[in-house]
Amino acid sequence: TAIVSLFSNASSAVLTRQVPSVPSVLRGDSVGHMHQEIAKSFAEDADHGSFFVAELSSVVRQHKRWLQFLPEIRPFYAIKCNSDPCVLRLLAGLGANFDCASLAEINMAITALGPSYQDTDGSTQSQRIIFASPCKFNSDIRGAAKRGIRMSTFDNMDELDKIAQYYPSSQLVLRILADDSRSHWPLGRKFGAHLAVVPTLLKKAKELDLNVIGISFHVGSGCSEPHIFADSIMRARRAFDIGKEVGYEFTLLDIGGGFEDKLMLNTNINLFEENARVIKDAILQYFPLTDRPEGFEIIGEPGRFYVTKAFTLATNIIARRVPIQGIDFVQPDIPLSVYLNDGTYGGLNNVLLDHRIAIPFVIAMGQSFDIPDEEKEPASIWGPTLDSVDCVNTWTIVPRGLNIGDWLGFTDMGAYTLCGVTKFNGFDASRVLYTTGTGIDGEEVWQILGKNFK
Ligand code: PLP
């Protein structure tokens, strides 16, 4: 109720939307101000008050950067990364498309596209969705067929049989194996056909009279080496040529996801911008403008690039353990262990699943937002469950004097966090509060979401 009253008392306007399942969005508020207001409103009882703040203008900024640096490549946002309904609606309004891993995600994409999904002439915008799972449930294939979602990926013989049986008019995209050795989430162990098996797969597709329209790859999530993209595009060129030998004229190149927005190690060069530069060069080299089939297009499936920075998690200290001098040997080098109301079974599951090093910042200490900077001490940080893998950080530096009721925040919490939350020990997921964010991009959020809900 504290959050509800904060929203109804807020000086900034609240967008009231027509869709009841979607929460309110604050207009023009900064993330820092929201943290403080909500922390204040929980002053007495913060136990259940961990919350994400989604700053939606950040998604707009990332979309604009994608269009600026990769103008030729249509983005299909990977819903698996963060399926927050406001993010999806915003992306639909911005003109982005969707990469879905299941029928449930396809339904989310269709909901996000809203009325714009169904054109007045009865046709749909089904080409704004790709079903990018090479190993699909039969029921999901039938569901995609019912909804007219034609584009989907495959990388094995059995999937071709399933498609021939349940959705023979699919537009298939063959996912080939990429070098994923420089990604922190390699995917090649599970998905992607080696070039050596591509002729066999395509011959079988031809025998089944299936429509294969192109080639995709995924370099693995969080790829730190731009030249891996160039190498994958070269492999895709080879697969296009094999397709020709088998009798296909491919028109789609899908360069997958794996993009990160950060500086490259020991440089001032942004990894995303460098990836974009290398990708553009490789596309011109292997798919020159003069040698492209009619209707040729390139798509990408970015996930974390779009949402990582948009979400911050605010947590509250619910308990502490301070070793009793001389007799407590649990962690002799750590003078303080703090326990938060969210942890690695909840919003901070990226510590376990995404190899994230979670370094907190302090939002409030002793109900004050003036954080003393002089004295620091080491601490370990834990989640609320009774499992010891629920450790957010085994050793980090915090201001001296952290206590129960104080607030710690974590930035860059938008990717692969909310989607992995469990109910372990009965704890609920941290709720999500939204701000449009400030400036022109924040106003654009306001315009898009407002229009979408009228
Ligand atoms: N496309 C596919 C098929 C994926 O499996 C993934 C992530 O696992 C993505 C796109 C998104 O990757 P990322 O978040 O690294 O951009």
Image (cartoon, grey):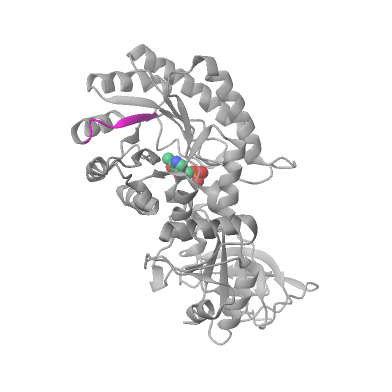
The part of the chain drawn in magenta is 167-174
Judge by depth and name the residue closer to the eye, 320 or 292.
Answer: 292
Position of the C terminus by quadrant: bottom left
> Magenta segment: does it hold 216?
no
Q: Is residue 434 visible?
A: yes
Look at 58% across and 24% down and name the residue there.
282
Whether residue 329 is visible: no
Q: Position of residue 43 (x, y in %)?
A: 58, 85
Q: Residue furthest bottom?
A: 44
Q: Quadrant of residue 156?
A: top left
At a point 49% along the width and 60% down the height, the residue shown is 349
User: Does the stretch in magenta take in 171?
Assistant: yes
Position of residue 283 relative to residue 149, above or below, is: above
**Residue 99 location, x and y as percent?**
41, 43
Q: Does residue 67 appear to the left or right of 18 in the view shown?
A: right
Say which residue appears at 50% left-offset and 81% top-offset: 5
Residue in the foreground of this view, choosing between 153 and 350:
153
Q: Position of residue 310 (x, y in %)?
A: 57, 57
In the image as oriented, which residue stretches furthest toward the right?
A: 374
Looking at the rendering, which quadrant does residue 444 occupy?
bottom right
